[in-house]
């Protein structure tokens, strides 16, 4: 393994499969690719590339005829978590979110109640069930609800889910995957992870929640690449949407979610 | 309206921007941090260095640019016509605090034992931009401490802020690639790549550019707190490149050299050999009194007696030679030439000059000699091309009966050491002027104490013809005269009384007599020197 390159495992995955390059986030990435004389137009993920054959066969107009005014065509959604029928679904943009979950995916598994759903991969702010009423699966609608469509990775969580643990899990992922180049992400992600961990294991303190929100705000927009934002958003969103649960967890030094 | 200091840039595409409401004229291609620096606005930064590529990873230089939604790093944002930059807005002040906090959370509180204290950019910026108590109550990240990277550099992983200046230095300046970043996230650390050692000829420059105490100088380790150092601008006496340095002393002893910026000579760097040369050039037991040879050996004597003996010995010599150290200043050399002309005219005068092979990395900065002022000496009438070697030959073949050797150890200085010893012993009169009782001095009939470069005020002319000023950083022992004072006294006793009482006056005199130096004075030389034959324009 070339020690000299930063091991951007997560980020590299997106770039690697499309271009076969080692992911080096930041100012050098376009220059690096240019130095290899690859055209730096779009660094696309596999899902975008998958739409190409259809478009080339039937034409761009036909593709654009689907979807909404601002979100054209279709998108692949990978649904996972506490859902009856997990899997990869291709939907026309603008499809109602609630209908998608309850009908097409068969609703929450084991007859349980929906507690929260992440619309587009672990970095996107979680949505509470009541927020889903007006949300359609397109960019503008989800953004209006305060989250983002992102990769379309829909993660469903039922009422047995401890949101503290969920947030802690996501924070640990981002801390582990941070490339470490820029100070806010390198130091901030691990700091948040450690605070979440402390809360989860019964050593949380009052002030921890506002501290995480503050750290998250200090990372957002100040990093070399969007990874920092991706780590900061879920941390803040979980606390904002499920504050009561976090506070109870801190006060009682244990998880207060019933697992019945 | 503020214009750039260097007028040449205004002839390139001018660009008008505002910085904190003040209009600034800069040039196309400049970055915001450069334009701000030239306009006198300091933007805090760690990873940016004017001589290294842009890394953009510290995020300390984030500034607000009007009409851009997010803050931008000043080091990598090019100026554009009409751009409005804010460096003191509430958003910017808040983000500086935040970045500092991030850098401090895993930073060990080593200040009491860290050499960088007093010249640490974390300390400085913290006092300027943060000053908050720590909010970090979870465990700090640990890393290797006091790890030897090379003969001159020691590394502390916990103090490192991963700005990567050191990595880029080894990649771009010395092109030796010893350092790399390994591991990911907050386990990132600097390491030696491929089991190398950080031993390139410019290795200790990474200590200068490290903003914190992660890379420190092994030679200077724990010697003295930097706020006790007395700093004097001067010129390195290592070789004829003439790198600009700051001689930093404590209790009248030189503690370290630091480079001074001079774009025309050494940029921001000095080589390791030059950096540590003061040990050899000032060390050992100091000669504090003149000595005269009598029955049984050298005995202490008064200046009066010693100088009379020198006069007598040189005047009566059939064939004399003068050998000056390459570290003698222009002022000293000027007087030495006058003196020898008076006492023993037609004696050859040479500067000790020997060349060696340099590696490609050494050539980045170093000259192949160890005579910082050979060129200045030549201008003063001492030395000619290849002259030193032929003078040595003549010495070995017994062509001379007397010699005056100043500031140079001839025996052991080159391969012909022992043969030179024999040749010197055969001289009927040998006077040696040096800081210590060297092997050469032990053979002398008269020994005169001298000063070393750190005690001298004067000028050196470097290999490329740049006249630069040395300033005295330490004071010589009370009974020791400056070399120029010794020569003046001898001239006086020989019947030529010159009324110079400072090196400045001597320089004024030599500027009048040596055509090349006409019109130059200590004032025009300043801290950056002046190029001979090039008027007063700084070369970039």
Image (cartoon, coloured by chain):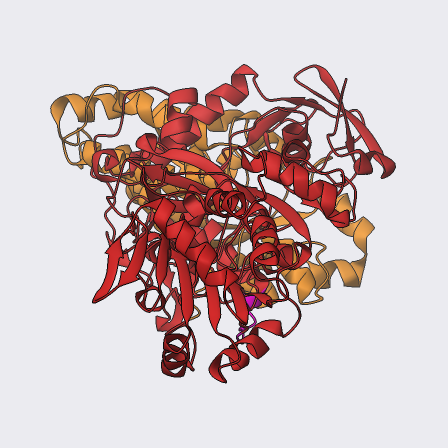
The front one of A33 and B338 is B338
- Image spot of residue A223 (x, y percent): 51, 38
**What is the letter of the red chain?**
B
Q: Is residue A111 above or below residue B324?
A: above
Q: How many marks?
A: 0
Main SS of the magenta part reads loop
B314 on left or right of B120: right
Q: Residue B128: tell me if it is visible.
A: yes
- Image spot of residue A242 (x, y percent): 32, 25
Q: Residue A242: tell me if it is visible.
A: no
> Does the magenta portion include B161?
no
The front one of A87 and B45 is B45
The front one of A203 and B299 is B299
The residue located at (48%, 58%) in the rendering is B238
- Image spot of residue A180 (x, y percent): 41, 48
Q: Is residue A218 above or below residue B294?
A: above
B239 on left or right of B442: right
Magenta-drawn segment: B356-363
- Image spot of residue A65 (x, y percent): 77, 44
The front one of A84 and B270 is B270
**What is the letter of the orange chain?**
A
């Amino acid at each position: 393994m070339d020690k000299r390159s930063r091991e951007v495992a997560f980020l590299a995955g997106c770039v690697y499969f499309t271009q076969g390059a080692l992911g080096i986030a930041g100012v050098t990435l376009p220059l690096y690719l240019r130095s290899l004389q690859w055209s730096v137009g779009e660094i696309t993920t596999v899902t975008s590339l998958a739409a190409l054959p259809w478009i080339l066969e039937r034409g761009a107009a036909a593709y654009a005829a689907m979807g909404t005014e601002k979100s054209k065509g279709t998108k692949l959604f990978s649904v996972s978590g506490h859902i009856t029928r997990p899997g990869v679904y291709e939907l026309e943009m603008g499809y109602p979110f609630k209908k998608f979950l309850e009908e097409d995916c068969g609703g929450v598994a084991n007859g349980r109640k929906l507690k929260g759903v992440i619309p587009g991969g672990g970095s996107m702010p979680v949505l509470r069930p009541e927020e889903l009423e007006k949300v359609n699966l397109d960019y503008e609608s989800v953004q209006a609800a305060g989250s983002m469509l992102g990769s379309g990775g829909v993660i469903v969580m039922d009422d047995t889910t401890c949101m503290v643990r969920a947030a802690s899990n996501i924070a640990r992922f981002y801390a582990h995957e941070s490339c470490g180049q820029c100070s806010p992400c390198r130091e901030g992600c691990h700091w948040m992870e450690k605070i979440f961990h402390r809360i989860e294991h019964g050593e949380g303190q009052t002030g921890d929640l506002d501290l995480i929100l503050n750290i998250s705000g200090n990372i957002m927009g100040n990093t070399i690449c969007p990874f920092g934002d991706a780590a900061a958003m879920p941390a803040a969103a979980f606390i904002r949407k499920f504050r009561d649960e976090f506070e109870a967890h801190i006060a009682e030094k244990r998880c207060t979610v019933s697992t019945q | 309206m503020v214009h750039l200091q260097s007028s040449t840039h205004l002839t390139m595409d001018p660009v008008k921007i505002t910085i904190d409401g003040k209009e600034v004229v800069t040039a196309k291609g400049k970055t915001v941090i450069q334009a701000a620096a030239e306009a006198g606005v300091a933007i805090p930064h760690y990873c940016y260095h004017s001589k290294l590529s842009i890394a953009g990873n510290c995020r300390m230089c984030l500034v607000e640019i009007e009409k851009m939604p997010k803050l931008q790093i000043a080091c990598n944002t090019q100026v554009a016509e009409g751009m409005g930059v804010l460096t003191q807005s509430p958003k910017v002040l808040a983000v500086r605090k935040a970045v500092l906090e991030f850098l401090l959370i895993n930073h060990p509180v080593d200040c009491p034992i860290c050499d960088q204290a007093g010249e640490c950019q974390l300390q400085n910026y913290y006092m300027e931009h943060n000053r908050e108590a720590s909010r970090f109550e979870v465990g700090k990240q640990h890393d290797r401490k006091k790890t030897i990277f090379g003969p001159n550099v020691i590394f502390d992983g916990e103090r490192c802020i991963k700005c990567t200046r050191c990595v880029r230095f080894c990649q771009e300046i010395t092109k030796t690639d010893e350092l790399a970043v390994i591991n990911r996230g907050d386990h990132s650390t600097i390491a030696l790549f491929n089991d190398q050692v950080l031993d390139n000829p410019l290795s200790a420059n990474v200590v200068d550019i490290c903003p914190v105490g992660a890379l420190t100088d092994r030679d200077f380790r724990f010697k003295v707190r930097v706020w006790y150092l007395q700093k004097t601008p001067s010129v390195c006496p290592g070789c004829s490149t003439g790198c600009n340095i700051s001689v930093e002393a404590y209790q009248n002893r030189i503690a370290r050299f630091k480079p001074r910026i001079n774009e025309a000579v050494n940029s921001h760097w000095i080589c390791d050999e030059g950096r540590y040369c003061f040990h050899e050039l000032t060390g050992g037991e100091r000669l504090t009194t003149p000595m005269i040879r009598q029955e049984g050996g050298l005995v202490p004597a008064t200046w009066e007696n010693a100088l009379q003996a020198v006069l007598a010995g040189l005047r009566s010599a059939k064939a004399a030679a003068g050998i000056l150290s390459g570290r003698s200043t222009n002022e000293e050399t000027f007087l030495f030439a006058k003196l020898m002309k008076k006492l023993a005219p037609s004696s050859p005068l040479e500067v000790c000059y020997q060349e060696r092979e340099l590696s490609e990395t050494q050539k980045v900065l170093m000259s192949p000699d160890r005579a910082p002022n050979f060129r200045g000496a030549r201008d003063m009438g001492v030395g000619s091309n290849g002259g030193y070697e032929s003078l040595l030959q003549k010495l070995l073949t017994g062509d001379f009966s007397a010699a005056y050797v100043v500031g140079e150890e001839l025996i052991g200085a080159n391969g012909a050491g022992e043969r030179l010893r024999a040749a010197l012993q055969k001289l009927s009169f040998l006077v040696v002027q040096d800081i210590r009782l060297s092997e050469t001095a032990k053979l002398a009939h008269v020994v005169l104490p001298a000063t070393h470069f750190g005690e001298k005020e004067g000028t050196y002319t470097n290999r490329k013809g740049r006249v630069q000023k040395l300033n005295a950083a330490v004071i010589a022992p009370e009974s020791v005269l400056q070399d120029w004072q010794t020569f003046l006294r001898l001239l006086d006793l020989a019947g030529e009384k010159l009324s110079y009482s400072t090196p400045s006056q001597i320089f004024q005199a030599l500027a009048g007599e040596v055509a090349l130096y006409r019109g130059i004075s200590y004032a025009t030389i300043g801290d950056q020197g002046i190029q001979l034959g090039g008027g007063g324009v700084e070369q970039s």
